Amino acid sequence: MLHREIEISNSDDVIDVRDVIAKIEEMEEREGGAEDHEMCIELRRLRSLMEDLKGYGGDEQWRGDWYPLQLIHDSYFETHAQELAEDCGMIERDAKWPYTCIDWKQAARELRGDYSSVEFEGVTYWYR
């Protein structure tokens, strides 16, 4: 079976929780062998993230609990709000006016009210 290398970092704009799950399961398969110290640290930090998300619901089921699909980096949330508005057809991607007049900081602040936050290695991520 071919494994693609999955890297998960607190500098990622968006973290797909399914990637976190895949990485944990991949490391657990190798656990117990000649595991290195770095792998143990990474496994611990990813398990901790999943533990912090556990019990808050979402669309991904894993080990008897539900988790959100995506975690959005705090610094990327304004871009996320803009992309969400485009994806939902609220605005057209090619539109000039009034698109260029939208206060995306304010739009992101209001959208954030529908989200919860989690800290991942000192960085805030948003999810729903």
Image (cartoon, rainbow, N blue to C red):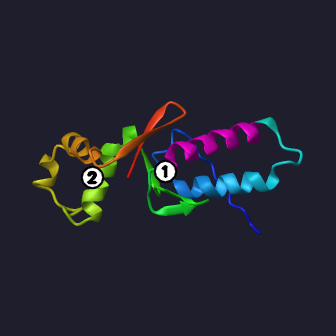
Q: Amino acid at mark 1?
A: Gly
Residue 38: give x, y in percent of width and height: 75, 37
* In the displayed structure image, the side of residue 58 where residue 121 appears, left or right: right
**Snapshot quadrant of residue 125:** top left
Residue 107: give x, y in percent of width and height: 20, 46
Nearer the N terminus, badge 2 or badge 1? 1
> Mark on residue 15?
none
Image quarter where the N terminus lies is: bottom right
Whether residue 1 is visible, yes or no, is: yes
Q: Residue at x 82, y 39 (%)?
A: 36
In the image shown, does 9 or 109 lie closer to the viewer?
109
Is 52 covered by the magenta stretch? Answer: yes
- Relative vertical location of residue 119 with respect to residue 56 in this rendering, above or below: above
* Alpha carbons under labels 2 and 1: distance apart: 29 Å
Badge 2 element: helix
In the image shown, does 98 or 116 lie closer to the viewer?
116
* In the displayed structure image, the side of residue 46 where residue 1 appears, left or right: right
Q: Residue at x 81, y 53 (%)?
A: 30
Residue 108: give x, y in percent of width and height: 25, 44
Q: Look at the image and give the residue range highlighted in magenta.
A: 38-54
Is the residue marked by circle 2 packed among few (<14), some (14-19), or many (20+) residues within 10 Å?
some
Label 2 vs label 1, nearer the camera: 1
Badge 1 element: loop
> What secondary structure is the stretch in magenta mostly built from?
helix
> Mark on residue 55?
1
